[in-house]
Amino acid sequence: MNNLSDLPTQFTIRVYGILLDESMGVLVADEFQNGRRFTKFPGGGLELGEGTRDCLVREWREELNQRIEVTEHFYTTDFYQISAFDNAKQVISIYYRVKPLEKMGIKISALPFDFAEEKDGAESFRWIAAGNFQPDLLTFSIDKLVAKMIQAYLQQT
């Protein structure tokens, strides 16, 4: 970008949970929004007046109908990223490890993009086995970077 008029005028802060299960793998969300399919980690947007951990607990409850404990910070975006949905916004993404406090209250699919209907806001969730988990299975560049970090973590355990 050559001048300030090319820069985004707002920030959007996104907060995501990383749920790793020894037998199941890594939990991901498949979504349809603005005419496109994408795969990401479960979570969503920080609301004004909300802390990042509170945001993740709320998002997890809304999307997965599950109570969680946010256990540890995993990563925060440390590079410039424009939103994939609004080039007037710069994205800051924060990732935490999470631990379930109860079973999920929704269907977990075996298939990607297993929507009842492909319309804006459609989402489904699935496990990717640790041995099959690859950065290219996620859509956004920040998630791909985090996926590489998760791969390194899984190789150490």
Image (cartoon, rainbow, N blue to C red):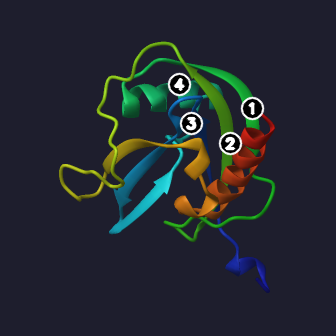
Q: Are marks 2 and 1 in contact (CB under 8 Å)?
A: yes
Name the foreground residue: 14 vs 99: 99
Q: Quadrant of residue 106?
A: top left
* Disc on the earlier residue, 1 or 4: 4
- Residue type at mark 4 is Val
- Tell me the SS state at disc 1: strand
95 displayed left or right of 25 = right
**Percent x, y of residue 26:** 55, 40
Q: Which residue is mark 3?
A: 48
Q: Which mark is residue 73?
A: 1
Q: Which residue is mark 2?
A: 94
Bin the neighbour count of mark 2 within 10 Å (Cα to Cα): few under 14, some 14-19, many 20 and up.
Answer: many
**Percent x, y of residue 18:** 60, 36
Q: Which mark is residue 57?
A: 4
Q: CA distance from mark 3 to mark 2?
A: 16 Å
* Disc on the earlier residue, 3 or 4: 3
Name the foreground residue: 29 vs 76: 29
Q: Residue at x 79, y 86 (%)?
A: 2
Which numbered mark, 3 or 2, is in the foreground of this view?
2
